[in-house]
Image: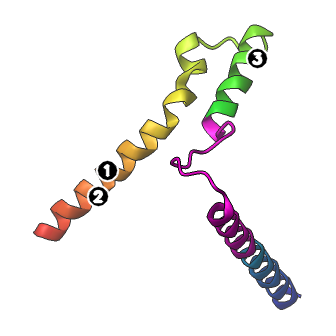
């Protein structure tokens, strides 16, 4: 029973990987075919932007009673992730140098 579930999960992961690789290949081909000479930029709203909008709507509808600095905290999520990665690299470099 467990083996069947594991095999099914592995099959789903392989399918997901195949789909991601295929989408990436299509996106690369589309980028090569485009005539734009300007640098590429991402479009749309990211995870942290969407989370901020959700928190603002919840605050304005009085579903949550958080202070505004907590509501707007996800705006600094991308910066926080970069700082954490740099901090982890610094710690790894210090440990590796010993």
Estimate the x, y position of residue 78 in percent, counting from the top left.
Answer: 49, 39
Question: Which residue is under mark 1?
Answer: 86
Q: Nearer the viewer, residue 13 or 43?
A: 43
Q: Report the quarter where the N terminus lies.
A: bottom right
Q: Identify the mark at residue 89; answer none if there is no mark.
A: 2
Q: Nearer the viewer, residue 33 or 95?
A: 33
Magenta highlight range: 20-48
In this rendering, position of residue 89 left or right of residue 5: left
Q: Is 28 within the magenta?
A: yes
Estimate the x, y position of residue 67 in percent, counting from the top left.
Answer: 58, 11
Estimate the x, y position of residue 28 in percent, counting from the top left.
Answer: 64, 67
Q: How far apart are the alpha carbons under marks 1 and 3?
A: 33 Å
| Badge 1 or badge 3: first in the primary sequence | 3
In this rendering, position of residue 50 left or right of residue 63: left
62 up-or-down from 56: above or below: above
| Badge 2 or badge 3: first in the primary sequence | 3
Question: Which residue is under mark 3?
Answer: 57
């Amino acid at each position: 029973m467990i083996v069947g579930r594991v095999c099914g999960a592995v099959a789903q992961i392989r399918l997901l990987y195949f789909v991601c690789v295929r989408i990436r290949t299509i996106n690369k081909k589309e980028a090569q075919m485009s005539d734009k000479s300007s640098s590429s930029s991402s479009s749309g709203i990211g995870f942290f932007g969407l989370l901020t909008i959700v928190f603002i709507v919840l605050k304005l509808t009085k579903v949550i009673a958080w202070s505004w600095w907590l509501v707007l905290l996800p705006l600094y999520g991308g910066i926080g992730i970069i700082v954490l990665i740099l901090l982890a690299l610094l710690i790894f470099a210090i440990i590796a140098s010993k």
